[in-house]
Amino acid sequence: MHPDFDITQPFTMIYHTPGGGEDVRVDYSVTGVGLTLARNEPVLSEEELFEIRVANAGFFERLSIAPPWGETPWVDVILLSILLGFVLAAFLSKNSSIRWITLAITLFYLGFHKDGFLSVSHITSMLKQGPGVFTSNLPTLMIVSFTVITTLIWGRVFCSSLCPFGALQDFITRFTPKRLKFQMPQAIHDRALYIKYGILALILTLALTSPEISIFQYFEPFGTVFFFSRSPVLWAILIAILLACVVVERFYCRYVCPLGAALGVMSLLSPLRIKRVPQCTLCKVCESACPTGAIRREKIDFKECVRCDVCETKLIKLAGTCRHPMEEITRRQRDKQAIPVVNLTPPVSA
Ligand code: SF4
Ligand code: SF4
Ligand code: SF4
């Protein structure tokens, strides 16, 4: 066959019959597997073809051809619904016992058992394939929807108690002796917090311009700890981050997490924020207690707030306003005395 002959196009075979009879003409066109092989394309199974069709479909088409509830184990959906209920209950009630129970469920069920954490890779996948990428898995769709809705309403509720790595950091802080804690100098903190926004921008830019390069695993240790990665480099990064979290509360959330940076930007749209009171212009109790360094006197840098409730639960509590009298705060400021936290909690009425 001539090398220029294109077998993928229809062609006619002419048979010269012996004895000078009339030629026989037969029209051919290669189809099916033969055509696939002729084009040097991979031969795919029905399942693989279906996956490609789903991957290329739009959001609503995906819902119809591959509904997320199609393959979903309903036990997972029920357990996840219970967890989301706990997250909301902890956040709305400001009850620290419920929050610690929620953090434990998040860490062990969502993190170690189900590998069900969100990652910046979900954002890059969505940018490349559209929001339909979440419709093939109902639990993922539930977590993403819950995170987006609560962030737009209240800020980073996800970071409060639905993120397994945030939960891990809170447990580290809870069991670390106070003498090991280090207060990050203000000037360094104010600059370092923008590192995570730079990391986010780098990951998104690379995802959009060079889809074959993926670097998020070097900045997100979630997969290392919850998937038990075999990479020594990733374990070295994880150990360095965890050691930093021992001395600086929520170190990773403060300075490194690209997902937290994305949620922080989104949280700037939320209307329901934390209230402050006039005493906050003088008092530094909440500022010292905030795990992410988001408070500066009466101001809260809301994009940095992980809605941990420390300032609302322990210090403002049920009355909705700090009970500490302004005169007392002024006097203590003048005397340069610390303001004991215990005095600031209003008595709970019977
Ligand atoms: S900032 Fe990142 S690690 Fe921290 S709680 Fe939020 S998503 Fe999780
Ligand atoms: S303890 Fe009260 S006055 Fe002090 S910063 Fe917190 S809310 Fe403001
Ligand atoms: S203590 Fe800080 S991180 Fe926690 S809710 Fe208050 S401002 Fe947000």
Image: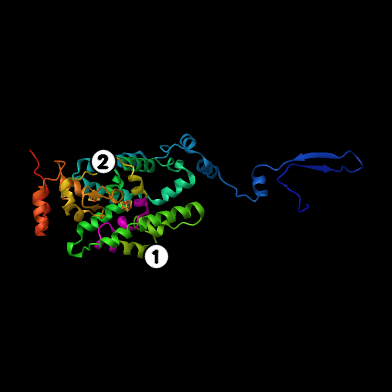
- Place residue 77 in its image quadrant: top left
Which residue does the image show at 41% across and 57% down from the upper left? 217
Asked whether the viewer can see residue 111, the reply is yes
Report the amino acid beneath label 2: Leu
Asked whether the viewer can see residue 116, the reply is no
Q: Secondary structure at mark 1?
A: helix
Where does residue 191 sit, x and y in percent of width and height? 32, 60
Q: Residue furthest right?
A: 20
- C-alpha distance separating marks 2 and 1: 37 Å
Q: Give the residue at mark 2.
A: 88
10 Å neighbourhood of mark 2: few (<14), some, or many (≥20)?
Answer: many
What secondary structure prevails in the magenta region? helix
Which residue does the image show at 56% across and 45% down from the upper left? 45
Circle nearer the N terminus (2, 1): 2
Q: For the magenta stretch, what is the residue range?
A: 243-261
Residue toward you, 254 or 161: 254
Colour scheme in use = rainbow
Report the amino acid beneath label 1: Val
In the rendered image, residue 322 lying in the magenta stretch gets the answer: no
In the displayed structure image, the side of residue 10 where residue 350 appears, left or right: left
Q: Secondary structure at mark 2?
A: helix
Where does residue 152 sit, x and y in percent of width and height? 33, 41
Q: Give the residue at mark 1.
A: 233
Where does residue 69 sit, x and y in percent of width and height? 40, 37
Where does residue 35 sit, x and y in percent of width and height? 67, 45
- Place residue 180 in its image quadrant: bottom left
